[in-house]
Image (cartoon, rainbow, N blue to C red):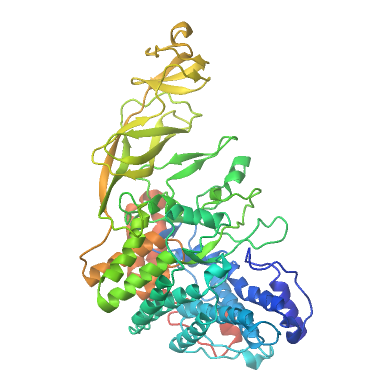
């Protein structure tokens, strides 16, 4: 039996979640003393400990999709009336059972590695990090279990046999489970390597342990344990990360996530990622569904659709999240899609930009398949990494913990303001009072006829206003030939007056124009119907075509040009002068803006004691304000009840483990 169990373990770790971690070939039929008798085999076993993170039960699917429903997102399928995504499920739910099972798979593998850590003859300096990572991962799996299920069986030794009596294990009180989590992670902190020694984020480093310890302590400080002494410990761990000198914020919020799509590592900010690799075509690698279930919807199977990458678009934003963003916050339009795709062409894809009123249309877009470079994109798998800890999260945890202990001190303000400055494209280390930006562009009702149906996206230029950097683009309808939406791609900064908006390309002299080029001159739009170089005389007619002898290229009147006006707005950057309660609320909002769709909002709301009331309220908001098209999105919030603070103990566990009891309400 032992040989069989170990054979299954080894085979199950053949697909590695780490791109840089390992490149090994599975071995069959080894006894424990044989399996752990070298450094390479210990590393192989360690990969097996990490592997459950990338399974569909955890971050490969459910934790980044169905379990991500909160006041930030609703499940975008009006026929979905049962399941975790709408909080209508019972203790037999398969996804809940899979979460439980895979956490215990990881714990069992960690227990086996810890028990056999000294079998191999090797350099002790290399053995220590392996032990540290195994201890940490055991603690992390128990953290997932405790925060989602409450009391759980605590198992710290490898399973000796599959005998029935060995699986009759009572649930350990959650406080004791957290005590063990802290013990494992604290021991790991002294054993793990620096992240700069790795150069990538797939393995747990010392500062990663410290950052997750801050998260664990904040969780313990909040509901349901309410161990307020843990605020001081959370602060201490977060401060260790800050003072390590290992980390800083990426200057670009967008680029940070593009890196995760492209196998690039910014270990300064992205401290821990679940790693995925390949497209599954060769049977190798380890793929997930990041950007495939939640992302910008793309369900065309044409060549251009496959170029973008298939996405179901299950997660749509709530108006509550959208409205949290101030003008100029660059995170909004990366996290929340400004567009859906136009895919009726073979040369490239185009964007259909939403209007200001189309808030609930917007997909959760933090992970978007067009951002990675892999060819031959698989319909249902992606290689996009998923972040488990970022430095911005550590800063916000530091701000929150410090505020609870001492109020909003300079330390707390510095931590939250670093995150806020980066959000507006400013230097995180430099104080900033306000920023004035282009906020919206509104189409005029007059004019706007005759645009080519094949143009789709045309440039929009903003000039004047005293600012710099603002850019925009417009959508041309594929059916009406009208400009239907304009998106501000970059709000710029420094605007003291409204800039002038110019839609499309102005006619110019001495330009070689190709057929089907479209320009405007005055208030009119013209299409080039005969190629040529323009003279100094531009087209002015309001019907028919110009004469080539007069205008060079032939310009045929198409219609009246579209016009628009911009608005500008000023946003406050650095927070100052808040009382402790207002500062806490500011942290809560900042965490949503910064960390949305990273599987953190539900546990945050639970520890703040706001999960049920917030979900009920946002459910009512959606039903009242989303219109007939999206009112169904309020179902999850309406269904949430006090029992949903915890998941049920799975039916499979209750059936086999007669010592286990069920959570209240289930």
Q: Nearer the viewer, residue 122 or 480?
A: 122
The number of numbered discs placed on residues in the rendered structure image is 0
> Image quadrant for the N terminus?
bottom right
Pick out the residue farthest to the right.
Answer: 29
Residue farthest toward the top in the current orientation of the protein: 549
Q: Nearer the viewer, residue 254 or 51?
A: 254
Name above or below for residue 512 compared with residue 410: above
The x, y position of residue 448, in whole percent, is 37, 27
Q: Would you place residue 259 above or below residue 55 in this image?
A: above
Q: Position of residue 578 (x, y in %)?
A: 21, 66
Tell me, yes or no, if residue 77 can be seen here: no
Identify whether 515 is placed above or below 339: above
Q: Residue at x 43, y 82 (%)?
A: 664
Question: Residue 492 appears at what percent x and percent y?
Answer: 34, 44
State left or right for residue 433 relative to residue 636.
Answer: left
Using residue 273 as the reference point, say whether residue 113 is left or right of it: right
Residue at 54% across, 60% down: 265
Q: Is residue 288 left or right of residue 211?
A: right
Q: Is residue 622 left or right of residue 116?
A: left
Viewer-nearest residue: 397 or 442? 397
Name the residue: 66% across, 75% down: 43
Task: Residue 281: tell me if it is visible.
Answer: yes
Q: Quadrant of residue 450?
A: top left
- At x 51%, y 53%, the residue is 258
Give the x, y percent position of residue 314: 50, 56
């Amino acid at each position: 039996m032992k040989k069989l169990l170990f054979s299954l373990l080894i085979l199950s770790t053949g697909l590695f979640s780490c791109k840089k971690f390992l490149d090994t070939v599975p071995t069959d039929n080894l006894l424990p003393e044989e399996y752990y008798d070298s450094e390479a085999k210990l590393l192989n076993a360690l990969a097996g400990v990490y592997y459950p993170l990338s399974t569909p039960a955890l971050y490969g699917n459910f934790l980044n999709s169905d379990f991500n429903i909160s006041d930030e997102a609703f499940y975008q399928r009006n026929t979905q009336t049962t399941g975790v995504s709408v909080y209508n499920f019972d203790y037999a739910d398969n996804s809940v059972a899979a979460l439980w099972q895979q956490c215990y798979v990881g714990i069992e593998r960690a227990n086996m590695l810890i028990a056999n850590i000294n079998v191999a003859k090797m350099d002790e300096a290399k053995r220590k990090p392996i032990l540290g990572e195994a201890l940490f991962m055991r603690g992390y799996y128990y953290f997932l279990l405790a925060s989602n299920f409450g009391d759980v069986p605590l198992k710290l030794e490898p399973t000796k046999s599959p005998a029935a009596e060995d699986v009759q294990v009572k649930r350990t009180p959650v406080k004791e489970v957290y005590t063990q989590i802290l013990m494992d992670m604290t021991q790991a902190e002294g054993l793990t390597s620096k992240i700069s020694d790795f150069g990538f984020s797939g393995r747990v480093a010392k500062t990663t342990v410290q950052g997750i310890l801050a998260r664990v302590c904040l969780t313990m400080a909040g509901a349901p344990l309410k161990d307020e002494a843990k605020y001081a410990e959370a602060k201490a761990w977060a401060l260790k990360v800050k003072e390590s000198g290992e980390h800083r914020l990426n200057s670009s919020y967008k680029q940070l996530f593009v890196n995760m799509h492209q196998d690039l590592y910014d270990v300064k900010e992205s401290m821990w990622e679940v790693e995925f690799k390949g497209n599954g075509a060769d049977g190798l690698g380890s793929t997930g569904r990041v950007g495939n279930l939640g992302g910008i919807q793309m369900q065309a199977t044409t060549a251009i659709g496959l170029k973008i990458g298939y996405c179901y678009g299950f997660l749509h934003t709530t108006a509550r999240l959208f409205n949290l963003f101030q003008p100029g916050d660059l995170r909004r339009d990366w996290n929340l899609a400004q567009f859906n795709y136009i895919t009726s062409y073979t040369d490239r894809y185009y964007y259909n930009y939403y209007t200001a009123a189309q808030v609930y249309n917007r997909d959760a877009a933090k992970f978007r398949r067009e951002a990675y470079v892999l060819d031959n994109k698989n319909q249902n798998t992606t290689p996009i990494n998923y972040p488990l800890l970022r430095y911005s999260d550590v800063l916000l945890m530091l701000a929150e913990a410090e505020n609870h202990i001492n109020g909003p001190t300079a330390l707390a303000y510095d931590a939250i303001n670093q995150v806020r400055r980066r959000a507006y494209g400013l230097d995180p280390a430099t104080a900033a009072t306000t920023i004035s930006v282009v906020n919206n562009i509104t189409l005029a009702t007059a004019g706007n006829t005759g645009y080519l149906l094949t143009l789709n996206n045309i440039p929009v230029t903003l000039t004047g206003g005293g600012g710099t950097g603002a850019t925009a683009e417009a959508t041309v309808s594929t059916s009406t030939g009208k400009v239907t939406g304009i998106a501000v791609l970059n709000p710029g900064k420094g605007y003291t007056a409204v800039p002038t908006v110019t839609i499309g390309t102005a006619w110019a002299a001495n330009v070689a124009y190709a057929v089907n080029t479209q320009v405007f001159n005055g208030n009119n739009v013209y299409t080039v119907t005969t190629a040529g170089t323009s003279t100094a005389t531009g087209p002015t007619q309001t019907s028919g075509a110009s004469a080539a002898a007069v205008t060079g290229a032939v310009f045929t009147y198409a219609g009246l040009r579209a016009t628009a006006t911009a608005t500008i707005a000023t946003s406050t950057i650095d927070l100052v002068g808040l009382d402790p309660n207002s500062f806490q609320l500011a942290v809560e909002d900042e965490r949503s803006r910064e960390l949305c769709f990273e599987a953190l909002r539900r546990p945050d709301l639970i520890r703040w004691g706001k999960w049920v009331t917030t979900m009920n309220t946002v459910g009512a908001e959606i039903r009242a304000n989303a219109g007939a098209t999206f009112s169904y999105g309020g179902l999850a919030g309406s269904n949430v009840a006090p029992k949903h603070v915890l998941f049920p103990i799975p039916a499979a566990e209750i059936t086999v483990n007669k010592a286990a009891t069920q959570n209240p309400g289930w």
